[in-house]
Image (cartoon, rainbow, N blue to C red):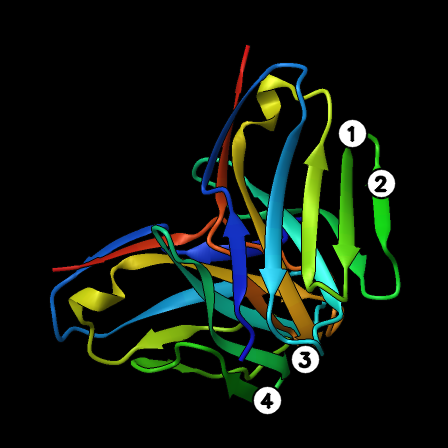
Amino acid sequence: GENVEQHPSTLSVQEGDSAVIKCTYSDSASNYFPWYKQELGKGPQLIIDIRSNVGEKKDQRIAVTLNKTAKHFSLHITETQPEDSAVYFCAASRGGNQFYFGTGTSLTVIP
Amino acid sequence: NAGVTQTPKFQVLKTGQSMTLQCAQDMNHEYMSWYRQDPGMGLRLIHYSVGAGITDQGEVPNGYNVSRSTTEDFPLRLLSAAPSQTSVYFCASSYSRVGELFFGEGSRLTVL
């Protein structure tokens, strides 16, 4: 099956700085890579996703990059704000509604 | 729009007891799934369904049972609870086989 590794497990940044979270996957058939944000006591919510036919996608302060050859993808958050503090999960899927998640990154933005 | 609703939010069981975690969605999504979340392990797929009457096993199905008699509901049954099933359980639904998952708020289960 698929194996998704996520680093770092914890990340602290000053408000206004950038944050980068990296994930690698093992199954070359995976073709959909979403990122979820989970706030305390809540379920995860999708913040951005990318499909295997695209190398980069941006949505305001959030961007995701995908390197299919190296089997890794990254989340970039620019101009971080305190409300960005949460746990972020990457995931990979080859379809059929089966997703494999990374182990999560706890991001703290220090005001 | 309620989205994905899970009940109960909290439950304490004794080893060997059985129970059902309820999940309902009002978005007419065909795809539904159950995940468990454990510290340091992310979310792991237990069972999933691609439509009413169709279910399949995920990564960690042992000790759990599911059925899907309607589009809206996807209950998760613990047959004989064990301490290793202490976890937070999330139900999710999706409109596509490869698309956004909409999660419920979770059910925290403790097995003593």
Q: Amino acid at mark 3?
A: Gly
Residue under pointer 2: A58
Q: Is residue A47 above or below residue A97?
A: above
Residue under pointer 4: B54
Residue under pointer 3: A96
Marks 3 and 2, how far apart at CA: 26 Å
Label 4–label 1 contact, CB within 8 A: no
Marks 1 and 3, how far apart at CA: 30 Å
Q: Residue at x 34, y 51 (%)?
A: B39
Q: Residue at x 52, y 46 (%)?
A: A7
Task: Return the chain for callout 3.
Answer: A
Marks 4 and 3, how far apart at CA: 12 Å
Q: Secondary structure at mark 1?
A: loop
Disc 4 versus disc 3: nearer the observer = 3
Q: Earlier in the sequence, mark 3 or mark 2?
A: 2
Dot 1: few (<14), some (14–19), or many (≥20) neighbours within 10 Å? few
Task: Return the chain for callout 1.
Answer: A
Residue under pointer 1: A61
Q: Position of residue A18 (x, y in %)?
A: 67, 25
Q: Amino acid at mark 1?
A: Arg
Q: Secondary structure at mark 4?
A: strand
Q: Quadrant of the C terminus of chain A?
A: top right
Q: Amino acid at mark 2?
A: Lys
Q: Residue at x 74, y 70 (%)?
A: B98
Q: Secondary structure at mark 2?
A: strand
Q: Position of residue A52 (x, y in %)?
A: 81, 66
Dot 1 and dot 3 within a common chain = yes
Question: Which of these two is toward me, B19 or A111?
Answer: A111
Dot 1 and dot 2 within a common chain = yes
Q: Amino acid at mark 4?
A: Ile
Would residue B74 be visible to someone looking at this image?
Answer: yes
